[in-house]
């Protein structure tokens, strides 16, 4: 049986997701070297982590709008080139102020990656494959994070942190050129895909609609602000990112400090949860699609195919983060955090699938809005951990806040209806078939 050509699209977005997090996590692996070179305190490093999150959050919705208007081909090629340049410029900074500026711009550059991918998935991926494809894409980010910490730690030891950032810049530029040359925004315009596969995609994706809103007196952004679905999706994603970004930033250095580990030892203990996050993405993606197919056949009401994996994931994340807080050894802490990240990442496929479900041709801006809220959570985490630790002398308060946010997110999923599109006059193809 020939491999579907759309699999190569998924492979490209998977690699982009890997690169996204390799570039992002590199600053955490280089934390001690950067802090020593620039004479930065833990609180200042918290602001360095936060500067990325702030730029990333603020440019989510604008980047999503660009992906919807200009198409993911040009937008993804452009933003990967931009963020790669700022990855390289990180190597040139010489002060706290310039580091904040470069990391903010780096975050702004990365902002359109997942909204752009969501818009590509809308056009290219049939409804019944949406969950597993989203799971594959997000597992790339976790595999990227898992690979980064030991590999980048070794590279930094050999070359120094500045040359490492330059190497990552060059890799990103190569991906950008390849994407621009080969990808097309719609399979209809793609010469390298067969007619039978093209017909299959067109028959099973959601119906294309115009960019006009259902109420011409209101703008698209007004629809988003008034959407209870979008508000609830955004709030639950804040909780998901609050935990996960701790794993990308402070989990590594706090393991070194808490248990007296070397950088390589801490990197291995930190990589374990990222691998479990990748597995969580695969499990949730498979589960989303299986529930979707079963519920569509039995009742036509497939909203629970998104809710059940997300609710399960948030429950596991809440249990895991509390367990990690009380672990006596680095292995136990890492294993509890594996459960936490496995659960947190189970929420990604249903969250992003729901953005595409309700956003449709506006999937970029809907997913960008949700991801903006999520990365405000990341921004909060970057600062909350070092400041709470400084104020209370313990990290326990942070862990309990994270657990409480995940419990609250469970309730939010009972308010989310994936079958209700952003534009009320649209009906989802496949919902009644």
Image (spheres, rainbow, N blue to C red):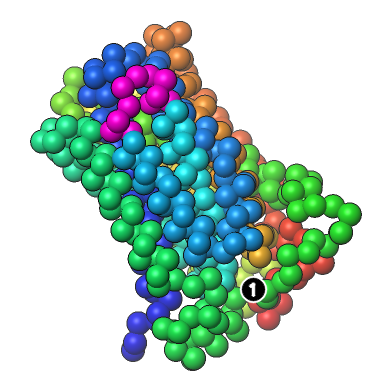
The residue segment tinted magenta is: 90-100
Residue depicted at 69% across the width and 43% down the height: 231
Quadrant where the N terminus is found in the figure: bottom left
Q: How many labels does the image show?
A: 1
Residue depicted at 73% across the width and 61% down the height: 421
Residue 399 at x, y percent in the picture: 45, 25
Up/down of 287 relative to 94, above or below:
below
Residue depicted at 40% across the width and 65% down the height: 179
User: Does 99 sit left or right of 257 as displayed?
Assistant: right
User: Does 337 sit left or right of 156 as displayed?
Assistant: right
Up/down of 226 relative to 16, above or below:
above
Of all residues shown, which one is farthest toward the right?
A: 217
Neighbor class of circle 1 (other Cα within 10 Å; few <14, some 14-19, many 20+) is many
Residue 73 makes an appearance in the image: yes
Quadrant where the C terminus is found in the figure: bottom right
Of all residues shown, which one is farthest toward the bottom?
A: 196
Q: Assess whether residue 422 is covered by the magenta stretch.
A: no
User: Does 10 sit left or right of 330 as displayed?
Assistant: right
In which image quadrant can residue 253 be found?
A: top left
Residue 391 at x, y percent in the picture: 45, 8
Residue 238 makes an appearance in the image: no
Q: Which secondary structure, mark 1?
A: loop
Residue 335 at x, y percent in the picture: 29, 38
Q: Assess whether residue 95 is covered by the magenta stretch.
A: yes
Residue 126 vs residue 340, the one in the foreground? 126
Residue 401 vs residue 359, the one in the foreground? 359
Residue depicted at 82% across the width and 67% down the height: 425
């Amino acid at each position: 049986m020939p491999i579907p050509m759309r699999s190569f699209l998924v492979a490209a977005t998977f690699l982009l997701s890997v690169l996204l997090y390799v570039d992002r996590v590199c600053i955490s692996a280089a934390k001690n070297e950067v802090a020593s070179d620039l004479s930065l305190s833990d609180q200042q490093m918290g602001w360095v982590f936060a500067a990325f999150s702030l730029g990333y959050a603020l440019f989510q919705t604008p980047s999503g709008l660009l992906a919807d208007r200009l198409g993911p081909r040009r937008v993804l090629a452009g933003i990967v080139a931009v963020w790669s340049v700022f990855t390289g410029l990180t190597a040139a900074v010489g002060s706290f102020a310039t580091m904040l500026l470069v990391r903010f711009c780096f975050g702004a550059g990365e902002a359109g990656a997942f909204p752009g991918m969501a818009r590509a998935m809308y056009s290219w991926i049939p409804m019944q494959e949406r969950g597993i494809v989203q799971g594959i894409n997000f597992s790339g980010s976790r595999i990227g994070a898992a690979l980064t910490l030991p590999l980048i730690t070794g590279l930094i030891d050999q070359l120094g942190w500045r040359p490492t950032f330059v190497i990552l810049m060059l890799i990103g530029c190569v991906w950008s050129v390849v994407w621009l040359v080969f990808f097309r925004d719609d399979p209809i315009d793609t010469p390298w895909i067969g007619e039978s596969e093209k017909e299959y995609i067109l028959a099973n994706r959601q119906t294309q609609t115009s960019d006009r809103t259902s109420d011409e007196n209101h703008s698209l952004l007004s629809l988003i602000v008034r959407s209870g679905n979008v508000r609830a999706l955004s709030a639950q994603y804040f909780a998901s990112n609050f935990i996960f970004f701790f794993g990308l930033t402070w989990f590594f250095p706090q393991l070194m400090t808490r248990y007296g580990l070397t950088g390589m030892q801490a990197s291995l203990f930190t990589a374990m949860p990222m691998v479990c996050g990748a597995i969580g993405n695969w499990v949730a993606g498979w589960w989303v699609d299986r529930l979707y197919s079963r519920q569509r056949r039995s009742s036509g009401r497939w909203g629970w195919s998104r809710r059940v994996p997300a609710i399960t994931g948030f429950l596991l994340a809440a249990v895991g983060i509390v367990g990690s807080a009380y672990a006596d050894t680095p292995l136990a802490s890492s294993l509890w955090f594996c459960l936490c990240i496995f659960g947190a990442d189970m929420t990604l496929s249903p969250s992003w699938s729901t953005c595409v479900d309700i956003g449709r041709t506006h999937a970029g801006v809907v997913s960008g809005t949700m991801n903006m809220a999520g990365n405000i959570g990341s921004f909060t985490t970057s600062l909350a951990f070092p400041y709470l630790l400084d104020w209370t002398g313990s990290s326990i308060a942070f862990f309990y806040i994270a657990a409480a946010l995940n419990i609250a997110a469970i309730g939010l999923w009972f308010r989310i209806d994936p079958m209700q599109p952003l534009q009320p006059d649209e009906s989802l193809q496949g919902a009644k078939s």
